[in-house]
Amino acid sequence: MKSKVQGEGDYESARRFNAKETQFVASGAVEGKKRRNLQPQTRAEADAVEKGKAHARLPAHEAKDAVIMKVRVSLRNNKHRG
């Protein structure tokens, strides 16, 4: 039997997805905010976190990202014109 179309999916696929998602969440594999709020357990971990954050904030990275975005916007605008 062919399923009724629901947007880009069908009702049976949606039911299977919802059931598997509910099972996954109930399994405890996801701890929600707890996982995001974990604190470093050692001084070495804390140093590594700080080093990573400092590296991510380097002005050179921000300048590089700005150039990349400028090029992408320019390419997108040119694509829509032609």
Image (spheres, rainbow, N blue to C red):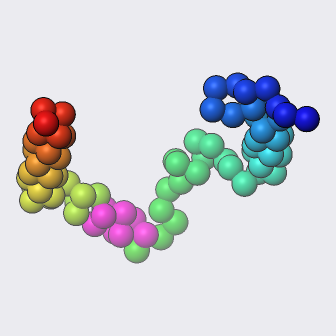
Q: Is residue 4 visible?
A: yes
User: Where does the magenta region start and end?
Assistant: 45-52
Residue located 70% across and 25% down the image: 6
Residue 42 sits above or below residue 80 on the image: below
Residue 44 sits above or below residue 56 on the image: below
Q: Main secondary structure of the magenta part?
A: helix
Residue located 36% across and 63% down the image: 49
| Closer to us: 8 or 65 | 8
Q: Quadrant of the C terminus?
A: top left
| Closer to us: 9 or 16 | 9
The percent position of residue 65, horizontal first and vertical second, equals 16, 52
Residue located 40% across and 74% down the image: 44
Residue located 69% across and 34% down the image: 9
Left or right relative to 30: residue 67: left
Number of dots carrying numbers: 0
The percent position of residue 70, horizontal first and vertical second, equals 10, 44
Q: Quadrant of the N terminus?
A: top right
The percent position of residue 42, horizontal first and vertical second, equals 47, 70
| Closer to us: 60 or 18 | 18
